Amino acid sequence: MPRLKLSPLFRNLFDFHGFKLCDIREDEHGITLVLDRTRMTADCPACGKRCASIEDTYTRRIRDLDLGLKQCFLVFDERKIRCRFGYRGVENPDFVDKYSLYTKRFEDYVSMLCAKMTLTDAALVAAIDWKAAKRIDKKYLSRLVTGLDDLNPRRLGIDEVAYEKGHNYLTVVRDIDHGKVIWVGQMRKKETLDVFFTELGEEKCARIEVCVLDMWDPYIASIHEHTHAAIVTICSTLQRKSTTR
């Protein structure tokens, strides 16, 4: 297995908190970068303090952004710790989420692909299973969702999104004025949107002025039941808009 020369550029590209690049290896599967720890302690994910009580050490291998046409993997030791303030479990390196098979920056890349193409195409470009691409996309979409407690939406965009084969859908509600997703529900039934309006509350529902959606009767029925909003329906085939109450 040939060993590649470590350069300052490579060290800077893989300069993670608490770790340093110590070796690079290339084989038929791609490039593997071995990270070594810079100190004996580990950071507690609960309190953020350094912890010297190490109960066990595990070798972890995760996928990172490709280097040229080669897939890139990171190998490092992860520690199970016992913090004196009560936490007992694995540490949480800042470049990878707990139990993930991919670095955060690789997941950022996959999420960007999913926003611009289908899950199947995104998985093909990233060279991962489409189910893995779906999990990453759902995780990042969930981070965009804002809690309803501090929101007072006036204009809503409501749509369904297919997330896997077999006509499985998510109902997505956006605050048009703020340009962000505020709620996501399983399926695209009237009862699905009913849950959103129930969670939002009667007082806030009464303030909704406009709902924009395609011509999907279950959504329209839920809007009529819970709000007095004007409904703007968008017909994708005819590319026209109509307003009803």
Image (spheres, rainbow, N blue to C red):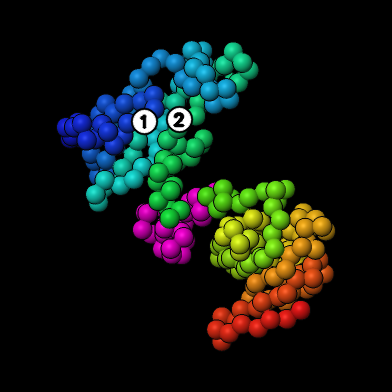
Residue at the spot of label 2 = 93
| Magenta residues, start to end | 113-139
Amino acid carrying label 2: it is: Pro
Dot 2: element: loop
Mark 2 and mark 1 residues within 8 Å of each other at the beta carbon: yes
| Image quadrant where one finds the C terminus | bottom right
Secondary structure predominantly adopted by residues drawn in magenta: helix
Question: Residue 159 location, x and y as percent?
Answer: 62, 68
Query: Which mark, by number, is residue 16?
Result: 1
Near mark 2 (Cα within 10 A), the count class, few <14, some 14-19 or many ≥20, is: some
227 to the left or right of 102: right
Q: Is residue 114 magenta?
A: yes
- Give the answer, above or below, for where 244 lies relative to 157: below
Q: Is residue 112 magenta?
A: no
Q: Which residue is at the front of the view, 244 or 1?
A: 244
Question: Residue 76 location, x and y as percent?
Answer: 37, 28
- Give the answer, above or below, for where 143 lies relative to 218: above
Q: Can residue 3 be seen from the camera position used here? A: no
Q: Which residue is at the front of the view, 147 or 217?
A: 147
- The CA span between labels 2 and 1 is 8 Å
| Image quadrant where one finds the N terminus | top left
Q: Residue at x 61, y 62 (%)?
A: 177
Question: Residue 210 location, x and y as percent?
Answer: 70, 70
Q: Residue at x 59, y 58 (%)?
A: 178
